[in-house]
C-alpha cells in the first residue's frame, strides 16, 4: 500500500499548530514588568526586569544589581485575566508595604511596615477580560517578602472530587494569568453595569489598632535625657525622652526626628556599634493589639534609622513587647504614658 509521507507530515504539522492555538491563549508575553528603585518611596531608579508572578523573597541579595535589598521599592505593571467570572478574593502576604490596583480600583492599600501581615480585598471580575494591574511594594528593614493570592469563585461544573482536591485556600495567582503591559491594550474600566455592587474590602493586615484615649507623648521620668553612650562599655540602655507617634498608629511624628537623628548620627559614626530596638505600650486594653502596635512602632523606628544612613547590619532586632514590661505598674491613668516608650540597647 502506497503512503504519501509528505501528506502525512503536512497533516501532522497542521494538527500540532491547531493544538497549540487551542491550548496557548493569544495574549501578550507572559509575566509582569518590574521597575526597581532605591528608597522606600521610589526615590532613585535602578532598572527594570520581568517577573513571572508576584511571589518573591530576598534578604541580603536583591533581584537586581545595584538595588539596596533592605531599603527599596518596586512597581509591577501588566495585564490580569481570570478564568471565571464573579467576586474574586485577593490577599497579599507582605513584609513590608503594598498597594494593589486592578482596573481603576485601589483594591489593597497597606503602605506601612508589616511583619509578614495579610491584606485583603474582593472585586467582581469578568472571565477572559484583560484588566490592567499595578502593584507597588516597598521594603524598609531586612528581609523582603511579597505573595499575591486569589480565591476564585466556585466553578459550577466542578465535581466534588476536584473541589476537594483543589482545596478551599487562596493560591498564589498563577503566572499564566499575567501578561506584560502593552500600549495597544487599553485599561479596562470596571463598569458598574456588570459589577453588581462589587465588594471592595480593604482590611488591616493584622488585628485592629488599640484605641488610645491619652496623648501619645512619651514621658519617661526615671530616664529622661539619659545620654547616648560614647564609651566602649559592653551594653548601654538608652531611653529617648521624645519619640512620639500618631495616635494608635506606627507613624513617627516630626517632633521625634531631632532625637532619632542624634541616635542615627551616633550609630553611623560608630559602625561597630549595634542596637536592639524594643517597643512598649501601656498595659490597658487588649494585650494582643498592644503587642502588634508596639512591634510596628519598633520596626518604624528601625526603618527611620536606616533611612538616615544607619547600616541594617547594625540593627540586631526590632521587637514589640506590648504592655508586658511596664515601668510604672500604678493603675492611675496619669502614669500610663510612662509605659508607652521605645527603648534601645546599644552594644
Image (cartoon, grey):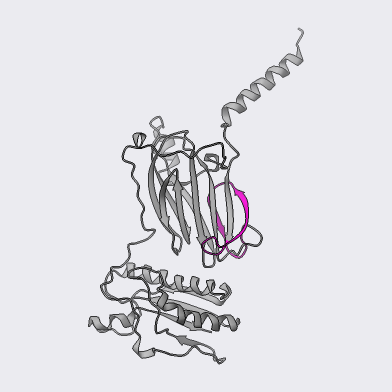
Q: Position of residue 316 (x, y in %)?
A: 53, 76
Q: Position of residue 340 (x, y in %)?
A: 34, 78
Q: Quadrant of residue 199?
A: top left
Identify the residue at image location x=43%, y=81%: 343
In this view, the residue farthest toward the left is 332
In this image, 58 relative to 125: left or right?
A: right
Residue 150 in magenta stretch = no
Identify the residue at image location x=75%, y=11%: 3
Quick one: 308 or 297, which is closer to the camera? 308
Q: Is residue 305 above or below residue 6?
A: below
Q: Position of residue 271 (x, y in %)?
A: 60, 81
Residue 61 in magenta stretch = yes
- Give the quarter of the figure containing the N terminus: top right
Q: Is residue 266 above or below residue 55?
A: below
In this image, 81 relative to 196: left or right?
A: right
Q: Is residue 72 above or below residue 195?
A: below
Identify the residue at image location x=55%, y=56%: 74
Q: Quadrant of residue 280?
A: bottom left
Q: Is residue 11 above or below residue 303?
A: above
How many badges with numbers are in the image?
0
Q: Position of residue 154 (x, y in %)?
A: 38, 36
In this view, the residue farthest toward the top is 1
Quick one: 323 or 35, which is closer to the camera? 35
For the record, the magenta segment spans 38-63
Amino acid at each position: 500500500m502506497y503512503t504519501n509521507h509528505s501528506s502525512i507530515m503536512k497533516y501532522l504539522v497542521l494538527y500540532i499548530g491547531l493544538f497549540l492555538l487551542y491550548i496557548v491563549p493569544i495574549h501578550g508575553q507572559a509575566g509582569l514588568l518590574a521597575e526597581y528603585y532605591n528608597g522606600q518611596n521610589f526615590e532613585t531608579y535602578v532598572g527594570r526586569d520581568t517577573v513571572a508572578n508576584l511571589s518573591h523573597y530576598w534578604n541580603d541579595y536583591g533581584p537586581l544589581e545595584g538595588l539596596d535589598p533592605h531599603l527599596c521599592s518596586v512597581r509591577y505593571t501588566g495585564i490580569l485575566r481570570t478564568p471565571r467570572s464573579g467576586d474574586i478574593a485577593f490577599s497579599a502576604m507582605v513584609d513590608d508595604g503594598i498597594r494593589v490596583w486592578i482596573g481603576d480600583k485601589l483594591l489593597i492599600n497597606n503602605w506601612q511596615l508589616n511583619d509578614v501581615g495579610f491584606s485583603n480585598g474582593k472585586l467582581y471580575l469578568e472571565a477572559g477580560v484583560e484588566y490592567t494591574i499595578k502593584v507597588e511594594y516597598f521594603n524598609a528593614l531586612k528581609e523582603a517578602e511579597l505573595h499575591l493570592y486569589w480565591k476564585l469563585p466556585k466553578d459550577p461544573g466542578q465535581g466534588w472530587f476536584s473541589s476537594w482536591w483543589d482545596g478551599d485556600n487562596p493560591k498564589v495567582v498563577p503566572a499564566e494569568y499575567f501578561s506584560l503591559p502593552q500600549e495597544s491594550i487599553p485599561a479596562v474600566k470596571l463598569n458598574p453595569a456588570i459589577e453588581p455592587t462589587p465588594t471592595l474590602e480593604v482590611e488591616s493586615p493584622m488585628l485592629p489598632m488599640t484605641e488610645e484615649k491619652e496623648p501619645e507623648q512619651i514621658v519617661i521620668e526615671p530616664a529622661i535625657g539619659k545620654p547616648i553612650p560614647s564609651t566602649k562599655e559592653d551594653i548601654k540602655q538608652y531611653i529617648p525622652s521624645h519619640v512620639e507617634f500618631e495616635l494608635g498608629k506606627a507613624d513617627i511624628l516630626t517632633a521625634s526626628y531631632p532625637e532619632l537623628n542624634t541616635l542615627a548620627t551616633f550609630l553611623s559614626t560608630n559602625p561597630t556599634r549595634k542596637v536592639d530596638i524594643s517597643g512598649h505600650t501601656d498595659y490597658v486594653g487588649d494585650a494582643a493589639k498592644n503587642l502588634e502596635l508596639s512591634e510596628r512602632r519598633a520596626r518604624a523606628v528601625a526603618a527611620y534609622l536606616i533611612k538616615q544612613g544607619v547600616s541594617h547590619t547594625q540593627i540586631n532586632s526590632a521587637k514589640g513587647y506590648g504592655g508586658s514590661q511596664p515601668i510604672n505598674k500604678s493603675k492611675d491613668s496619669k502614669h500610663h504614658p510612662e509605659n508607652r516608650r521605645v527603648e534601645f540597647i546599644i552594644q
